Image (cartoon, rainbow, N blue to C red):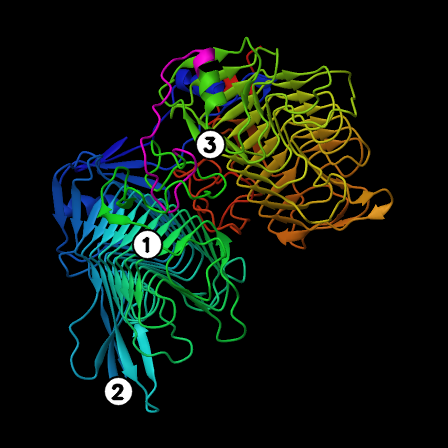
Amino acid sequence: MRATGSVHRSVPMRPLAAALAALFAAVPLARDAHAHAPVAARIGSTLSVTTCSESALRDAVDGASNGDTIDLTTLSSCTITLAAGEIAIAVDNLTVQGPADISLTLSGNHASRVFHHTGHGLLTLDHLAITAGNDTMPRDEGKYTVYYGTGGAVHSDGDVTLSSSSLTNSSVCYPVGNNQYNEGYGGGMFAEGNVSVIRSTVSGNTACGSIVPSVLGIVSYHGGAGGGIFAGGHLYVSYSTISGNQAYARGGGGVYGEGNITLVHSAITGNGAVQKGGGVAIRQGDEPIGDTLVRLTVRASTISGNTAMDGGGLASLYGSPVDVSDSTIAFNTASRETFDGWRAGGGGVCVNGYSLRLTNSIVANNTAHNNGQDITLFNIAGPTPPIAGDHNVVMSSSPAAPPDTIAADPGLLPLADHGGQTQTHALAPGSVAVDAGRPYPGLFFDQRGSGFPRTIGAAADIGAFESGTPPSPVTDCSEAVVRAAIANASDGGVVDLSPLSHCTITLADGAFTSNVDNIAIIGPADRTLIFDGDHRDRVILHSGGGILTLDHLDITRGYVDDGKYAGGAVFSSGSIVLASSKVTRSMIGGPADNALAIGGGGLYALRNVTLDESVVSGNSSHGRAAGICALVGDVTIRNSTLSDNHSDLEGGGVFAPGCFGVCTVGEFTTTIENSTISGNSAGTNGGGVHVTYGNLVVRNSTIAANAALDTVAGGGIFVRNVVNGVQLAPAITIASSIVATNTSAGPAADIGSLTSLVIQGDHDIITAMNGTPPSDTLTGDPGLLPLGDYGGPTPTHALATGSLAIDRGSNPGHFASDQRGADYPRVFGADADIGAFELSQPVVVDRIFTDGFD
């Protein structure tokens, strides 16, 4: 450790005992588990600032290296007002961490920005109060002087995450005179890349612009976009409030995005824009981002009290689809009084040129002078599409709302604190929205989040708010009590087991059973609730056709036999979402090489399977699919690990046939992102992944050390592209991923198939396959360290120093972090590393683990 004044740099070292504890928490013991030993990893350094002074903060930032953290956690009740201008951040990745009570204020004093990040990685601002920033720079354009500004308080040439923070009272504005005008973008924040806003407040910011007539008399709008935030990439807002921001020209009073915008469990209130999108405006940027169409998605959120000329609540400017569910859009105003064919009003929602889907939402009590008071959907380039969706309350729309829409006043109470992180409109007694809804699949809480179930009573309410008294959480660690809670849950209900920390329930009376379509079972935050099947029966049986969500649970030692050959731990007749959970050491028994065993030693779903930040490990099947099986649906694996699963037949880790009965090639897709599939094996083909009729997309993932015994097996991936003599052509895309060090009985050890494949993608390492990889594919040893605990909730393969994968990848999914989560940036250095792991500092390996315990 070295000390420099009041700045202290330290590199945290994990003690042996902690490393051992992490091993057994993250990777339950399975076959040869100790061979995949954890390794202590070091990422970045911490520079601690203990003096409430501008100079100490600047010294820390100036001395930071890529991936470091500036620790300001001791500076409670401190205000630092910048006197020497903005704080320049040149490194790609940096975290600035404030105190838990968010009482550290960083002020630009309305004279400069607070932070200017010229790196191209991720700037994370956590537990900070950032205020009073301003950015304008004069630019001579001949006849005019333009005062150009980007990011009143925060500017980034890369990505930004604002977490548990506030961003307030900042601007990109200059008091202009004759022949001068403003062109400002992002009154509070501007980012060239992606922006994430999590449990934060963005309020009172302003982006100034100008309305300039041309020589032909046509008005043009310059700047004034994104009063609160301007995102050049994707924008994600979660459990946050965007309020009281203004955009004085183009639009997006609250937020303006040129990539996908996703709003979940948030409130967009009291913002204003001169032109379009008082609360939210989305516009396809000049450079396509991934898909050629960017999308606006609103889930479980409130958009209220915003104003603009068109689209008082939200506006899709040029062809971006809009999808709104379980939300309330009310009391917004579109002020334009004339209608010229495409500036179309829409007090709540204005969509130009593409689709609008509205599900279980209220769009009412909005005001406009043209067309639909609440909704206007139009297309200046062709026929106007219909509004899609169901179970809504809409008072006035153009064109007509879906046929089952309730066209009545929903009885909204004033915007207020009704619990949760953000304000909501509660429903008055007798509201037409009560018990009249059907929520978005997999959404189990209303806007307020945990503790406020989406469904209370006979059915869900329409809109962002669920009326009624939530059921009490389960506090008794007993099989009988938990079994009753699961069995008696209503459709769409939540079984809240969050109080049951350090509880193990060993089943004596068979599987926990639910017959409703949609149910969520939520465990404690520390993930210490264990459901143990004791190898007597499976653990959970879901016979409904909807979504079974399992969150923060440890499910282990399930077993099925005696004709039940699917779902050793969990079986669903619908779909499964596994989040922040583990499924381990479960089994489909019966005779060896059993062709009747459909599969899913860990998880089986008739429809879709989704994994997020989860581990499926040490499961087995005497037939197919030791890890997971989705019979006729999509498989989505993100930020997760499948390891040490073994099947006698196909698909050791993942089995996705994509077909039952009548089959359509490409109808379903297996997507693997930021994930690791390692050490799985199959007696025939597809040791790691087996797909048949469906498409396969692999991004920023590592598929390594898997095995298959068939001669065309594909130890890593097997694509069955011939069925009954018919050649299939599923789409296979692999990007910035490692598929290497797998084994099989034939030459195509990494990717096998019955006939030659052509794989799309780029920036991969693939050492042996049947067919043609992307043209820039590398074929050398990727230099993977053993599967282990290198930080984050799931085990990964770290990269050895000098690995072929370092800085040779890309970031096609635009991820902010690697598989391990928020503390581990996806891009560190010149470019992203290939695979699921991003190396930031050399990994320190303790010999006791790599040599094993024996």
Label disc, if present, on residue 24 of the rendered structure? none
Furthest residue to the top?
508
> Split into 4 quadrants, where in the image is the N terminus?
top left
Residue beneath label 3, please?
843
Q: Nearer the viewer, mark 2 or mark 3?
A: 2
850 within the magenta span? no
User: The disc labelled 3 sits on which kind of residue?
Assistant: Val
**Label 1 to label 3, Cα distance in Å?**
61 Å
> Split into 4 quadrants, where in the image is the C terminus?
top right
SS class, disc 3: loop
Magenta-highlighted stretch: main secondary structure?
loop
How far across and how far down the image is residue 742, in percent? 69, 33
- Let me know if residue 14 appears in the view: yes
Residue at position x 46%, y 20% in the image: 25
**Label 2 to label 1, Cα distance in Å?**
52 Å
Label disc, if present, on residue 143 of the rendered structure? 2
User: The disc labelled 1 sits on which kind of residue?
Assistant: Asp
Image quadrant where residue 767 sits? top right
Query: Badge 1: few (under 14), some or many (20 or more) residues near its Cα, within 10 Å?
Result: some
